[in-house]
Image: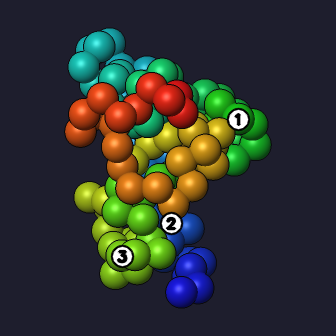
Amino acid sequence: MARTNTRRMNTLRADFFDQGKAQSTSDDPDTRALSNCWLCKAPVDYIAEPHSTDDSHNLDHYYIVRDYPELEEDVDNFRHSHRLCNLNRGTRAPSLGLGDAVADWW
Ligand SMILES: [Zn+2]
C-alpha cells in the first residue's frame, strides 16, 4: 500500500505540528504533556524543523497506515512523537499503556 502524500496531508501534518508546538508552551502542565512524545513521554523539540533531528517532531499514526490506510488523514489517529521513537517503533502495533511489554525496546 503506497502512502499518499497529498497537499491535504501536508496541511494536516503542519497543523498538527503547530498544535503540538502551542501546547508545548502552555502554562498548564497537563496541556504541555499533550505535546510530548506519545511513545516515550518525553518533550518533543518543537524548535527544530520536523524530521530534522532525532528529537524533532514526527507525526505518528496510532493505527499504522499500512494496516489502516483509511485512517491516514484522520486527525484522531495522529500522535506527536520523536522522529527517532517513530523510527524505532516501525510498524509495530502500539504497546505503550497496554501493559508491561514495553521496557525491552525502550
Ligand atoms: Zn519519544
Picture quadrant where residue 97 is located: top left
Q: Give the Cα distance between marks 2 and 3.
A: 20 Å
Camera-near label (2 vs 3) is 3
Picture residue at 45% right of the left edge, 26% below the top: 103
Q: Between disc 1 and disc 3, whose residue precedes?
A: 1
**Depth check: 50 or 99 in front?**
99
Q: Give the Cα distance between marks 2 and 1.
A: 22 Å
Report helix, strand or loop for mark 2.
helix
Residue 79: image x %, image y %? 39, 48
- Labelled pair 2, 1 in contact (Cβ < 8 Å): no
Q: Between disc 2 and disc 1, whose residue precedes?
A: 2
Q: Which residue is mark 3?
A: 68
**Depth check: 104 or 88 in front?**
104
Report helix, strand or loop for mark 1.
loop
Residue 58: image x %, image y %? 57, 47
Q: Give the Cα distance between marks 1 and 3.
A: 26 Å
Q: Split into 4 quadrants, where in the image is the N terminus?
A: bottom right
- Residue type at mark 2? Thr
Crowdedness near tag 1: few (<14), some (14–19) or many (≥20) residues, C-alpha within 10 Å? some
Vertical placement of residue 38 versus 64, above or below? above
Q: Which residue is mark 2?
A: 11
Residue 56 appears in the figure: yes
Q: Which residue is mark 1?
A: 54
